[in-house]
Image (cartoon, rainbow, N blue to C red):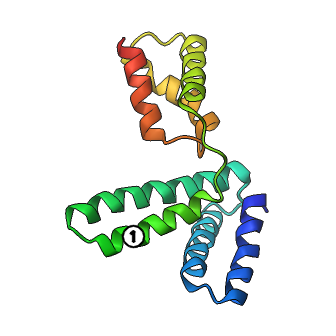
Amino acid sequence: MSETRQRILDDIKAAMKAGDKPRLATLRLMSAAIKQIEVDQRTELDEPGTIAVLDKMLKQRRESIAQYEKANRNDLVDVEQSEISLIQEYMPAALSTDEIASVIDEAVASSGASSIKDMGKVMGMVKPLLQGKADMSAVSQIIKQRLNA
């Protein structure tokens, strides 16, 4: 069992004892998402796999916030934002813009990418290195800028 998964399970028990229902609900969602992937793949997720699941949950919540803001549902925006802040507690430390750019530049150089057609190669190289440490949609935009320049 991954370290992050174990931490989530321990925090579920703590939230139950403390009677912290909002935190407990989000932790259970996180645990259920991880468990669902494990059942579907018939395997136990390692640390990078667990982080990938949590990263996907963050992305879903960011998309939901955009939709809720368009519909002027600030109550739902607040719920999603609180879930994001809790999920982020379990994510690795975010990289700075310079660190992200450095990883991208290294991948572009080592792959020999020269045009936007090579974006898939570069994205394939940087995704395992940046998953959970950077917003992958922003990374994608930076790669596009580098390859179009």
Residue drawn at x 59%, y 51% is 52
Report the amino acid beneath label 1.
Asp
Name the image quarter holding residue 24. bottom right
Residue drawn at x 42%, y 59% is 60
> Relative to 122, does residue 45 appear above or below in the rendering?
below
Judge from the rendering whether residue 116 lies leftward or rightward of residue 33; answer left or right.
left
Tell me, yes or no, if residue 2 can be seen here.
no
Image coordinates for residue 127, horizontal then vertical, percent: 57, 35
Tell me, yes or no, if residue 106 can be seen here.
yes
Image coordinates for residue 17, horizontal then vertical, percent: 72, 89
> Relative to 27, does residue 111 appear above or below in the rendering?
above
Image coordinates for residue 116, horizontal then vertical, percent: 37, 18
Look at mark 1 in the image and give the residue it sits on: 78
Residue drawn at x 53%, y 30% is 97
> Relative to 126, does residue 11 appear above or below in the rendering?
below
Query: Residue at the left extreme?
Result: 71
Name the image quarter holding residue 141. top left
Quadrant assignment for the N terminus: bottom right
Residue drawn at x 61%, y 84% is 20
Q: In front: 70, or 126?
A: 70
Q: In front: 143, or 65?
A: 65
Quadrant assignment for the C terminus: top left
